[in-house]
Image (spheres, helix red, strand yellow):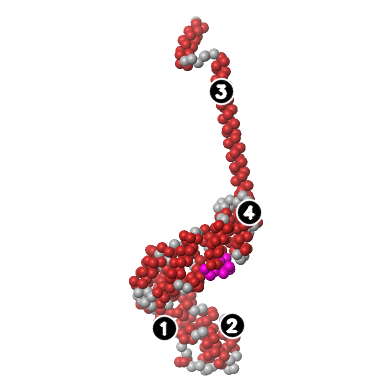
């Protein structure tokens, strides 16, 4: 019975299957051919996969070799530590020594020391992949052309290696031209750039005219603008928000734009926040200063805001307790807070104290503020050499801390 049913099922299925495949000859050889195609396709896929794996393995080996060569070169040729070389190998891939050797040779020919070269590579490893003739050399020549000595150039580049990544035509030359339009003399521009190597990282040419216009509208003389640019280029070329904020703070303190103290205050306030100023005021309050006293002192000596809290406390206490000055006297002469305690204030006070103890000078003839402001040679002549016969120890007392 089951055999009959199976036969009937075959009879029904085979014609149906033949109808579905059309002219395809349903026989054993066709099935073999079809299966052969599938086997062949599988073989091809396996071959492609194996080929891809081989290429992937080759690529990984090449990458590993490149990384190994890079690390080795950074250590052996550039002086980096192994740890630093591994870290910096992420930023530069070297496959041969020809180009990086040319870069190192160029630096050495321009007077760079080994330490300076190591510092450049450590800070900016990608420089090893730049063209020595097409990219690096023209920039080194540019610095030489504007008045930098080879040692100046080496110091600039080692201090700010990414300067060599800036476009000569779009950044370095416009920066120089903009500075020269304000400072006029080439020597002044070089001094400015030496003071602020990172000037080249700023888009100076975009803000020169607006900044000069603002300062002139306030009444700041050109000579004060020139001083500000040369003394503190990062104050003058700071962001628009920062520049305006500093200007407003200086104006609120009452500085006269026509006087030199205005731009001096800009430099001091640029590095001092409002919260720091408030903290400084509270320090002086301990010695009886009022808010008006503090503002008056800041106007006379803006850098008073940059003197450390410890130095303020130490100097104020010594001037009051050891020399006998009144705290309010210092309001009118706050510049003494910036003088060295160990090299100026203490040794001069010790000399004056010895002279007073022997009656060689009269107390009413002594003005400590004048004495502290004197040049060292002037003080030596007037108070030390003049009395060395009576008190030979004066010379040792004065010179031991100079």
Q: Nearer the viewer, residue 310 or 304?
A: 304
Q: Residue furthest right?
A: 76
Residue on which the image places disc 2: 400
In the rendering, at what x and y percent does residue 84 appear?
59, 56
Residue 340 pos. (x, y %): 51, 78
Q: Which SS class for mark 1?
A: helix
Q: Earlier in the sequence, mark 1 or mark 3?
A: 3
Q: Is the residue under label 2 in contact with that under label 3 (CB below 8 Å)?
A: no
Looking at the picture, how far across and down is residue 321, in whole percent?
47, 82
Contact? badges 1 and 4 (CB < 8 Å): no
Of residue 88 and residue 332, the one placed in the foreground of this image is 88
Front residue (pair 82, 40): 40
Span highlighted in magenta in the image: 146-154
Q: Is residue 60 magenta?
A: no
- Asked if residue 252 can be seen in this view, the reply is no
| Residue 397 visible in the current orientation | yes
User: Which x, y percent locates residue 126?
Assistant: 56, 55
The label nearer to you, 4 versus 2, is: 4
Mark 2 nearby-residue class (10 Å; few <14, some 14–19, many ≥20): few
- Given this view, does label 3 or label 2 mark the residue nearer the observer? 3
Residue 120 is tagged as: none
- Which residue is label 4 attached to? 98
- Spatial CA span between label 3 and label 2: 101 Å
The label shown at residue 329 is: 1
In the image: residue 381, left or right of residue 328: right
Side of 168 where 206 appears, left or right: left
Q: Gap between marks 1 and 4, in whole Å? A: 69 Å
Mark closest to the chain's N terminus, 4 or 3: 3
Q: For the residues carrying marks 1 and 4, which lies nearer the camera in this image? A: 4
Position of 125 relative to 259 (above/below): above
Whole-angstrom CA distance, mark 2 to mark 1, is 29 Å
In this rendering, position of residue 270 left or right of residue 149: left
């Amino acid at each position: 019975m089951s055999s009959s049913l199976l036969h009937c099922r075959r009879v029904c299925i085979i014609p149906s299957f033949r109808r579905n495949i059309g002219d395809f000859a349903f026989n054993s050889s066709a099935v073999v051919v079809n299966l052969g195609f599938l086997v062949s396709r599988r073989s091809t896929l396996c071959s492609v996969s194996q080929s891809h794996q081989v290429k992937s393995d080759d690529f990984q080996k090449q990458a590993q070799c490149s990384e190994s060569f890079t690390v080795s070169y950074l250590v052996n040729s550039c002086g980096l530590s192994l740890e630093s070389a591994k870290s910096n190998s992420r930023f530069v891939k070297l496959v041969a020594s020809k180009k990086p050797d040319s870069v190192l040779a160029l630096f050495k020919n321009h007077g760079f020391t080994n330490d300076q070269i190591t510092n450049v590579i450590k800070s900016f490893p990608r420089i090893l992949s730049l063209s020595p003739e097409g990219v690096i050399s023209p920039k080194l020549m540019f610095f030489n052309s504007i008045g930098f000595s080879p040692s100046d150039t080496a110091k600039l580049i080692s201090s700010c290696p990414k300067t060599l990544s800036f476009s000569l035509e779009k950044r370095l030359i416009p920066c120089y031209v903009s500075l020269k339009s304000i400072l006029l003399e080439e020597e002044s521009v070089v001094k400015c750039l030496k003071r602020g190597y990172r000037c080249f990282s700023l888009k100076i040419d975009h803000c020169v005219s607006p900044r000069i216009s603002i300062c002139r509208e306030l009444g700041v003389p050109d000579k004060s603008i020139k001083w500000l640019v040369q003394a503190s280029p990062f104050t003058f070329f700071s962001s628009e928000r920062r520049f305006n904020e500093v200007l407003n703070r200086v104006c609120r303190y009452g500085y006269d734009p026509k006087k030199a103290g205005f731009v001096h205050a800009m430099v001091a306030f640029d590095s001092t926040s409002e919260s720091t100023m408030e903290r400084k005021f509270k320090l002086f309050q301990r010695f009886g200063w009022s808010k008006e006293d503090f503002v008056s002192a800041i106007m006379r000596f803006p850098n008073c805001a940059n003197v450390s809290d410890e130095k303020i406390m130490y100097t104020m206490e010594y001037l009051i307790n050891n020399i006998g000055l009144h705290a309010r006297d210092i309001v009118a002469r706050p510049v003494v807070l910036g003088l060295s305690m160990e090299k100026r204030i203490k040794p001069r006070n010790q000399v004056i104290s010895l002279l007073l103890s022997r009656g060689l000078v009269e107390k009413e003839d002594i003005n400590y503020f004048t004495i502290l402001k004197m040049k060292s040679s002037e003080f030596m002549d007037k108070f030390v050499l003049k009395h060395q016969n009576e008190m030979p120890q004066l010379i040792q007392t004065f010179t031991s801390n100079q």
